[in-house]
Amino acid sequence: MASPPAVPRLPPHDPRTPALSVVDMHTGGEPLRIVLAGCPEVVGPTLLAKRRYMRQHLDHVRRRLMFEPRGHRDMYGAVLVPSELPDAHLGVLFLHNEGYSSMCGHAVLALGRFALDFGLVPAPPAGAREALVNIHCPCGLVAAFVECEGGRSGGPVRFHSVPAFALATDLLVDVPGRGKVMVDIAYGGAFYAFVSAEKLGLDVCSTKTRDLMDAASAVTEAVKAQFKINHPDSEDLAFLYGTILTDGKDAYSEEPTTNICVFADEQVDRSPTGSGVTARIALQYHKGLLELNQTRAFKSSATGSVFTGKAVREVKCGDFKAVIVEVSGQAHYTGTASFIVEDDDPLRDGFLLK
């Protein structure tokens, strides 16, 4: 039998459609597929304009990379684009099964490593133990700090969030099949509803993921129908991204508090959710349960992975009292791939099973 060629080559494909080259990573079990090459130019004078352009004109790229057969309904992705901000090293558009997020903490932690290792930021000075990577997300500029040795990444990454704040507390919503439920809504680059799973008759640590997903999705739809989300800076940010079910342990403890995030189209985060940790820290600080620079650990009920977070300083966001939150976690590389399209493939743009 003939040996395969020593140099990998692409299989037959539509020459009019460039191959999509990616690097795959995960942070606490949550995947991130970073597009290296093959995505057409994303046009727009600002990052939010680029986000709108990609949604309107290049959504097939998202579907091909996130959906089956190349991905799955819980895949997450990132397209790197130029930023209009002078201090940004790179801009990023976040992709998921429903569309485009405003913020993604697990992706920022992974992109910090990626940006340093792939030369997207200046090499740190000799002997430096940490490199700064300024990432322009749709919600704003996020500073990532990457542990490094010899100019290469290694160890955990931490980031400083955009201003995070509590939007509403003790909000009573009528959840079909669940009755009236008290929820909090907070912003950490994206808006989330927070509710103790116990209030829904569930245990975030032992209930089946499918049951947690159904309950969280019902809360999300109820809040969307009964409460208007507003953000002081932009209407592009004024939407509820998902619901985070918690173990109810909001008071400070050195023990981790457990949660699970269900976002977009019933997508389940495998990690503790970076932007969710940001919002939950802001909520706990708002309620007087945390002090500045008091670190808490947050555990994913899906994988057991842990992020840490703390409020590092007070700021304002419009009329809201807000905080900058530092979130730390570990990202890992998992591989690379090149995805192609054959012109006669009826499923070329992917599909999802419901």
Image: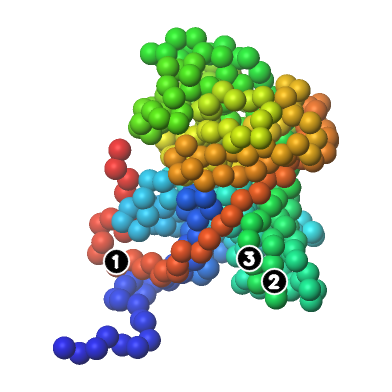
Give above or below for 81 relative to 288: below
Colour scheme of the picture = rainbow
Quarter of the figure with residue 97: top left
Which quarter of the figure has residue 1? Answer: bottom left
- x then y, percent, for residue 289: 72, 24
Residue drawn at (57%, 49%), measured in percent from left and top?
106
Residue at 71% x, 55% y is 144
Amino acid at dot 2: Glu
Say which mark, if any, is on residue 343. Answer: 1
* Circle 1 Cα neighbour tier, 10 Å, few/some/many (<14 / 14–19 / ≥20): few
Asked if residue 51 shows in the view, the reply is no
* Image position of 324 with respect to 224: above or below: below
> Counting residues from the N terminus, which is met first, the one under dot 3 or under dot 1?
3
Q: Amino acid at mark 1?
A: Asp
Residue 27 spot, x, y in % from top left: 53, 53
Q: Nearer the viewer, mark 1 or mark 2?
A: 2
Residue 339 lies, with reference to residue 329, above or below; the image says below
C-alpha gap between disc 1 and disc 2 = 45 Å
First along the sequence among labels 3 and 2: 2
What residue is disc 2 on?
149
Residue under label 3: 154
Q: Amino acid at mark 3?
A: Gly
Instruction: Please give the name of the residue rendered at 56% of the width and 44% of the height, measured from the top-left corner.
Output: 306
Mark with earlier residue (1, 2): 2
Element type where label 2 sits in the image: strand
The CA span between labels 3 and 2 is 7 Å
